[in-house]
């Protein structure tokens, strides 16, 4: 089977009942599977809330490894809207020409370095490094900071061996405390300094609020971007003709990027907490129980997407929800899109072939569902033009 073939384990349940069932660390959970239901419940924050105990809406739960709220992710409107308003201009910076040029340079350098090596382990030696270096542009700090972030591994909270181990979270907290403290009396242009000077409803943000925003910045786009980069490389390894197509027709880059994000859906789902007794896809859901919005299932819904289990690089109708939907649509989407477009164009312009040498799949288990989300290891050889 091709390395870039990702199955849809939710199809049967999506078409039969519209839901799946699992238990997340002793917390029973209903998974919402259809595209229409995912979008509808994502917008109904009065019934399905993000404002829960810190870590509860993440799947798997992070309640036992952090007690700091990620802002504005773990909030509902109108509070969510107010905090997001403070941050939105900053997260639109990827559309500035200087930002784009710097990002293109980072990506080109990463691809060039890969071409010089006999083999590259993509997850840790390419994707993690590129994600971390690109994040220095978003945070607007010197690129040398990326080396610290790279040392944390592919996830900033969960230990590879024990998902309930808070050691890694403590490392991130200490690092952020130091950065926020240094920025408190600074007039710098980095994200910490800008947040320290920002106001919400006529007051300055507290240190805990700044910390909550920065935790989301570091955690929200880490393993997801690493998955997106790694899976995209696996696709072009299986389909070298796609690189030729994009090289010949670079205007396809927008559609191709969105299609690869839809197909691979680097984040499987995200939770919400039920506020009152209700029904989810005609299934009873009690107050304070948990549901998840399964982006990965919604993105394969055959009632919305023609040939949903195929990558169609010129797909014209593509209402995917890889970045979520509604008020909580991912703030980092601009940065991720720019990064992925730059990567695909650089691969098309510099690479003739990508050969997979060895691969270990990363399989998530959600109750009875097993979903490939990416790779634990993907060792490849890049061949230049």
Image: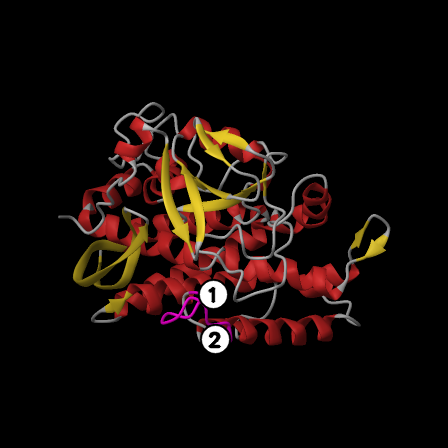
Q: Residues within 10 Å of mark 1 (few under 14, many from 20)?
A: many
Q: Residues within 10 Å of mark 2 (few under 14, many from 20)?
A: few
In the image, residue 17 above or below residue 194? above
In the image, residue 267 above or below residue 19? below
Which residue ends up furthest to the left in the rendered image? Answer: 1
- Front-most of residues 41 and 209: 41
Kindly identify the residue that appears in the image at 59 percent across and 62 percent down: 215
State how far apart marks 1 and 2 are (Cα). Answer: 8 Å
Q: Which residue is mark 1?
A: 132
Helix, strand or loop under label 1: helix
Residue 54 among magenta residues? no
Residue 160 among magenta residues? yes
In terms of image quadrants, where is residue 230?
bottom left
Left or right: 256 in relation to 211: left
Q: Position of residue 307 (x, y in %)?
A: 25, 28
Which region of the structure is painted magenta?
155-167
- Front-most of residues 72 and 184: 72
Can the viewer see residue 115 in this picture?
yes
In the image, residue 8 above or below residue 363? above
Left or right: 182 in relation to 70: right
User: Pointers 1 and 2 in contact (CB under 8 A)?
Assistant: yes
Q: Position of residue 210 (x, y in %)?
A: 70, 61
- Front-most of residues 228 and 282: 282
Main SS, magenta region, reads loop
In the image, residue 373 above or below residue 324? below
Query: What is the count of numbered marks?
Result: 2
Left or right: 155 in relation to 352: right
Q: Earlier in the sequence, mark 1 or mark 2?
A: 1
Q: Position of residue 55 (x, y in %)?
A: 55, 57
Helix, strand or loop under label 2: helix
Can the viewer see residue 312 in this picture?
no
Kindly identify the residue that appears in the image at 68 percent across and 50 percent down: 87
């Amino acid at each position: 089977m091709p390395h870039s073939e990702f199955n849809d384990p939710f199809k049967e349940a999506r078409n039969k009942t519209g839901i799946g069932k699992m238990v997340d660390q002793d917390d029973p959970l209903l998974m919402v599977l259809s595209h229409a239901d995912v979008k509808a419940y994502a917008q109904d924050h009065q019934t399905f809330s993000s404002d829960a105990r810190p870590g509860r809406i993440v799947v798997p739960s992070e309640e036992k490894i952090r007690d700091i709220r990620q802002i504005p992710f773990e909030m509902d409107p109108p509070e969510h809207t107010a905090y997001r308003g403070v941050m939105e201009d900053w997260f639109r910076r990827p559309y500035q020409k200087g930002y784009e040029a710097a990002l293109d340079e980072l990506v080109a350098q990463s691809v060039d370095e890969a071409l010089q090596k006999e083999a590259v382990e993509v997850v840790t030696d390419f994707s993690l490094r590129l994600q971390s270096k690109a994040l220095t542009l978003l945070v607007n700090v010197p690129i040398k900071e990326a080396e610290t972030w790279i040392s944390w591994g592919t996830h900033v909270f969960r230990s590879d061996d024990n998902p309930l181990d808070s050691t890694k979270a403590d490392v991130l907290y200490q690092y952020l405390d130091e950065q926020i403290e240094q920025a408190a009396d600074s007039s710098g242009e980095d994200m910490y300094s800008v947040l320290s000077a920002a106001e919400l409803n006529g007051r300055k943000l507290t240190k805990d609020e700044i910390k909550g925003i920065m935790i989301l910045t570091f955690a929200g786009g880490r393993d997801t971007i690493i998955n997106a980069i790694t899976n995209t490389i696996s696709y072009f390894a299986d389909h070298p003709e796609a690189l030729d197509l994009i090289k010949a027709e670079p205007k396809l880059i927008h559609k191709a990027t969105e299609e690869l994000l839809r197909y691979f859906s680097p984040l499987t789902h995200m939770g919400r907490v039920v506020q009152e007794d209700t029904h989810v896809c005609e299934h009873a859901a009690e107050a304070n129980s948990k549901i998840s919005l399964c982006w990965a299932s919604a993105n394969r819904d055959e009632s919305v997407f023609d040939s949903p289990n195929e990558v169609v690089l010129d797909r014209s109708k593509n209402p995917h929800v890889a970045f979520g939907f509604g008020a909580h649509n991912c703030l980092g989407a601009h940065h991720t899109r720019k990064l992925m477009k730059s990567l695909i164009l650089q691969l098309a312009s510099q690479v003739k072939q990508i050969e997979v040498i060895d691969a270990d799949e990363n399989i998530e288990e959600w109750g009875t569902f097993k979903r490939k989300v990416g790779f634990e290891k993907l060792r490849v050889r890049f061949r230049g033009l």
